[in-house]
Every structure is written in C-alpha cells, then in structure tokens.
Amino acid sequence: MIQEDDDFIKSKSNTWKKHNDLNEKLVYMLDHKVDSALKYADKFSDENGLVVPEYIVKGLQWLIK
C-alpha cells in the first residue's frame, strides 16, 4: 500500500536506525511518526476499514503543539 501510493513522501535514505534496505516512504514515516500519523489517519481509516480513535488523533495534535 505504501509503495504504490503517491501521497506518501519519500526519505532520501533507505536506512532507519539499524535497519537497512527499507522502503524510502516507510523510512520517512518512521522519522516523522506524529506528522505521518496525523496526515494518514483518515487515509488508513477509509481504505482499510480501520478506525483511528479520536483520542489518539487529539493526542497527536497535542504533541505537535
């Protein structure tokens, strides 16, 4: 899903911590967890039938402030 979706941003690296040869889009998401979670919460909820609880979204928004 991540690789095929053009909305996901790519990192300049394919390494995260001790993990090598990762997808660049996944590395970006791991480096920017809060921003990525907020940006893609609706996308994941809509496409996969998953529901991100409102308290998690509000908690992530609080972290950014």
Image (cartoon, grey):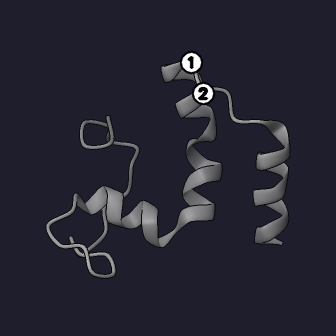
Residue assigned mark 1: 49
Residue assigned mark 2: 45
Residue type at numbered disc 1 = Gly
Is the residue 58 above or below the residue 48 in the image? below
Instruction: Give the CA separation, mark 2 to mark 1.
Output: 5 Å
Mark 2 lies on a secondary structure that is helix
In which image quadrant can residue 41 be found? top right
Residue found 25% across the figure and 43% down from its top: 3
Residue found 57% across the figure and 22% down from its top: 46
Give the farthest residue toward the bottom. 17
Image check: 4 left or right of 50?
left
Mark 1 lies on a secondary structure that is loop
Residue type at numbered disc 2 = Ser
Is the residue 36 above or below the residue 53 in the image? below
Q: Nearer the viewer, residue 30 or 12?
A: 30
Residue found 21% across the figure and 62% down from its top: 22
Instruction: Locate residue 65, reporting x and y percent.
Output: 84, 72
Mark 2 surroundings: few (<14), some (14-19) or many (≥20) residues within 10 A:
few
Mark 1 surroundings: few (<14), some (14-19) or many (≥20) residues within 10 A:
few
Image check: 36 left or right of 12?
right
Give the farthest residue toward the top. 49
User: So how many labels did they put on this image?
Assistant: 2
Image check: 64 left or right of 36?
right
Instruction: Locate residue 39, reporting x and y percent.
Output: 59, 48
Instruction: Locate residue 57, reporting x and y percent.
Output: 77, 47
Instruction: Locate residue 15, reporting x and y percent.
Output: 24, 75
In which image quadrant can residue 29 be found? bottom left
